[in-house]
């Protein structure tokens, strides 16, 4: 009679696949779960049974919830972070000091919660399956029998907003009120190429646009008589000793005269006095006044140079011989002799006004108008040899704005950053760029970048940000782990066609223009005629690639996406035994299951969702089955296969 040695379950110090397989053979799983809950004064060590793990006692005070993780939907760049709710028994009142009114009450927001799973009392075998922090809204509650905490996954911090900085009047006191408060753009990649039909497309902000000496405008004022008199004009942007003229359609207070030249004595951003000489004291004003008053720069004043800032981050390059004025529909090259104010960070410049003899706007010397826009050719943030690499840009956004550190990333980020074959998946050769001046979430934006080159990101079981590949050539045709019929909970096995990502005709929309605020290029329409014939209708989709600008690259991505989307793959929901405990999101398994009419024989499948039901000791999975999707090394051999790696994709004429 066959038998199996049961002693490994008594002596194992780590959870391995060999151990889990042996456990499954003997129907013995000694996997247990513990929780460490930080409180305002100490740490609660709790479990669903009384036990020691190492030297720490875990009291039987909690009913452990299911913990689920997901990659999310393909072509939908949203990563859902886990929220975990856990209730701790307080029937005996032992935790009353931690409650509102207790001697140790000081609030629970931000306290840590960590769930671990391992082998009975072997501390070295326990690994973290969830780590998070009590939420600021509704994160703590209590009743007569228990206290309850709700925690968000620690990586939720990656959802920080960016850009974060705004144009402000403290830094740029002469910026116009219309611009103040808008976001300062974040720029990556090469903005010196693929600009057609415009000569340049990165706009600069005129940071002295509120200065009356820039465009020589009139401004309405109010005058308060007194010693001295005070002139009020919201955000006047004057400097002390600026020469100005005062005019009116009524009567000015004494001793002011219409058209007279005076010198500003600045009091604050909205108020100033008037002196009769540079450096003089503000004069007293008396007597009646009528009508609407205004001021303008005096004729003896000098027009200010236009002060332009592209962004506050250091740029790799600014092409000073490729700066243009856009006025109405025309572009005018700014002579390099008129460019000044350059700095080592390559992010700002000035343009001289009214320079006699330099005829460059409609045959006249340049005079600034409030509708003028200056656009430049530049290269964004310096990422060394990866400044144009879409994976490197995504990683830098997560670090710079999401608060990630180098240790948060799985090693395969470097692998995909450097991938050079095959041509349709050679990420290292693709050129990408970013200009973002609207509020985004760092994680979601990084996911959208990766999606454009058929990559995804998720938090793996080792608490690393890992990349999952949707490149056919990266998929294993013969995964080592096989789900057998006896692994599965019978009623949980539910296969169905993935109709959310099924289409057979596609076009790419790409090359975002910051100047036009839209994508400016489109590919031709690509089609899988065999899939269209099989389905009996065309299902069309436009895919957006705002951060790619090379047509060959975009067409290659569209082609590969269409090969997969037109294959009519299946999603399989299934609950399996803890033998699959070490499997992770993005991992591949073979499905060998037969339940009634559902028969899968050695079908490769990718794990899209995974969870652990602590009470039932089972692994909850959603798999993406490739039963109808051939890829290198895997040929299903079934009739009716129209998609996959070898599908024929043609371009409509």
Image (spheres, rainbow, N blue to C red):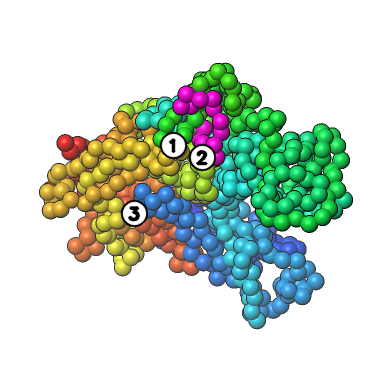
Residue 137, percent across and down?
61, 66
72 relative to 271 in the view: left or right: left
Q: Residues within 10 Å of mark 3 (few under 14, many from 20)?
A: many
Is residue 491 placed above or below 79 in the rendered structure?
Answer: below
- SS assignment at label 1: loop
For label 2, the residue is 371
Give the quarter of the image for residue 305: top right
Mark 1 near mark 2, Cβ–Cβ under 8 Å?
yes
Specify the segment rendered in magenta.
Answer: 361-374
Q: Which mark sits nearer the N-terminus, 1 or 2?
A: 1
Residue 305 in view of the camera:
yes
Residue 536, percent across and down?
12, 53
Q: Which mark sits nearer the N-terminus, 3 or 2?
A: 2
For label 1, the residue is 328
- SS assignment at label 3: strand
Please name whichever residue, 11 or 154, is drawn nearer the observer in this view of the structure: 154
Give the quarter of the image for residue 308: top right
Q: CA distance from mark 3 to mark 1?
A: 55 Å
* Front disc: 3 or 1: 1
Please name whichever residue, 128 or 522, is drawn nearer the observer in this view of the structure: 522
């Amino acid at each position: 009679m066959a038998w199996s040695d049961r002693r490994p379950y008594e002596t194992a110090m780590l959870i391995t696949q060999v151990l889990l397989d042996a456990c499954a053979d003997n129907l013995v799983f000694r996997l247990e779960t513990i929780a460490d809950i930080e409180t305002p004064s100490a740490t609660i060590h709790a479990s669903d049974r009384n036990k020691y793990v190492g030297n720490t006692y875990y009291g039987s005070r909690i009913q452990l919830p299911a913990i689920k993780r997901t990659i999310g939907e393909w072509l939908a760049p949203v990563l859902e972070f886990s929220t975990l709710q856990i209730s701790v028994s307080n029937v005996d009142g032992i935790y009353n000091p931690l409650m509102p009114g207790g001697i140790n009450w000081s609030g629970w927001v931000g306290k840590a919660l960590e769930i671990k799973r391992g082998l009975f009392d072997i501390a070295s075998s326990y690994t973290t399956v969830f780590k998070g922090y009590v939420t600021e809204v509704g994160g703590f509650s209590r009743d007569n029998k228990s206290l309850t905490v709700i925690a968000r996954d620690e990586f939720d911090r990656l959802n920080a907003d960016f850009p974060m900085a705004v144009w402000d009047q403290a830094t740029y006191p002469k910026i116009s009120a219309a611009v103040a408060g808008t976001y300062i753009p974040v720029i990556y990649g090469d903005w010196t190429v693929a600009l057609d039909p415009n000569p340049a497309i990165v706009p600069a902000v005129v940071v002295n646009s509120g200065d009356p000496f820039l465009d020589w405008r009139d401004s309405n004022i109010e005058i308060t008589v007194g010693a001295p008199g005070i002139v009020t004009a919201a955000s006047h942007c004057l400097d002390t000793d600026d020469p100005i003229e005062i005019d009116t359609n009524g009567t000015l207070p004494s001793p002011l005269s219409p058209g007279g030249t005076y010198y500003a004595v600045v009091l604050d951003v909205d108020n100033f006095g008037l002196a009769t000489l540079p450096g003089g004291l503000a004069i007293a004003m008396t007597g009646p006044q009528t009508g609407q008053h205004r001021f303008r720069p005096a004729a003896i004043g000098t027009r200010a140079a236009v002060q332009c800032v592209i962004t506050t981050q250091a740029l790799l390059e600014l092409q000073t011989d490729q700066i243009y004025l856009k006025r109405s529909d025309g572009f005018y090259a700014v002579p390099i002799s008129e460019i000044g104010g350059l700095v080592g960070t390559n992010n700002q410049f000035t343009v001289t006004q009214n320079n006699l003899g330099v005829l460059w706007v409609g045959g006249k010397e340049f005079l600034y108008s409030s509708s003028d826009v200056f656009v430049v050719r530049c290269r964004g943030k310096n990422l060394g040899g990866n400044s144009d690499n879409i994976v490197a840009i995504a990683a830098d956004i997560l670090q710079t704005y999401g608060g990630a550190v180098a240790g948060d990333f799985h090693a395969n980020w470097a692998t995909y950053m450097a991938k050079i074959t095959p041509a349709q998946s050679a990420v290292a050769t693709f050129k990408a760029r970013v200009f973002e001046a609207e509020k985004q979430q760092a994680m979601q934006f990084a996911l959208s970048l990766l999606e454009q080159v058929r990559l995804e990101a998720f938090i793996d079981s080792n608490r690393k940000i890992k990349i999952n590949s949707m490149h056919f050539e990266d998929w294993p045709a013969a995964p080592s782990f096989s789900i057998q019929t006896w692994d599965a909970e019978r009623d949980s096995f539910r296969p169905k066609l993935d109709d959310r990502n099924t289409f057979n005709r596609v076009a790419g929309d790409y090359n975002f223009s910051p100047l036009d605020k839209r994508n400016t290029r489109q590919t031709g329409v690509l089609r899988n005629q065999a899939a269209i014939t099989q389905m009996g209708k065309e299902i069309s989709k436009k895919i957006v690639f705002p951060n790619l600008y090379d047509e060959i690259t975009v067409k290659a991505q569209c082609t590969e996406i269409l090969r997969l989307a037109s294959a009519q793959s299946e999603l399989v929901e299934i609950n399996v035994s803890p033998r699959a405990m070490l499997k992770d999101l993005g991992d591949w398994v073979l499905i060998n299951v037969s339940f009634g009419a559902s028969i899968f024989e050695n079908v490769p499948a990718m794990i899209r969702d995974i969870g652990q039901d602590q009470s039932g000791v089972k692994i909850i999975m959603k798999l993406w089955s490739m039963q109808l999707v051939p890829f290198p090394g895997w040929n299903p051999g079934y009739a009716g296969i129209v998609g996959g790696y070898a599908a024929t994709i043609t371009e409509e004429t």
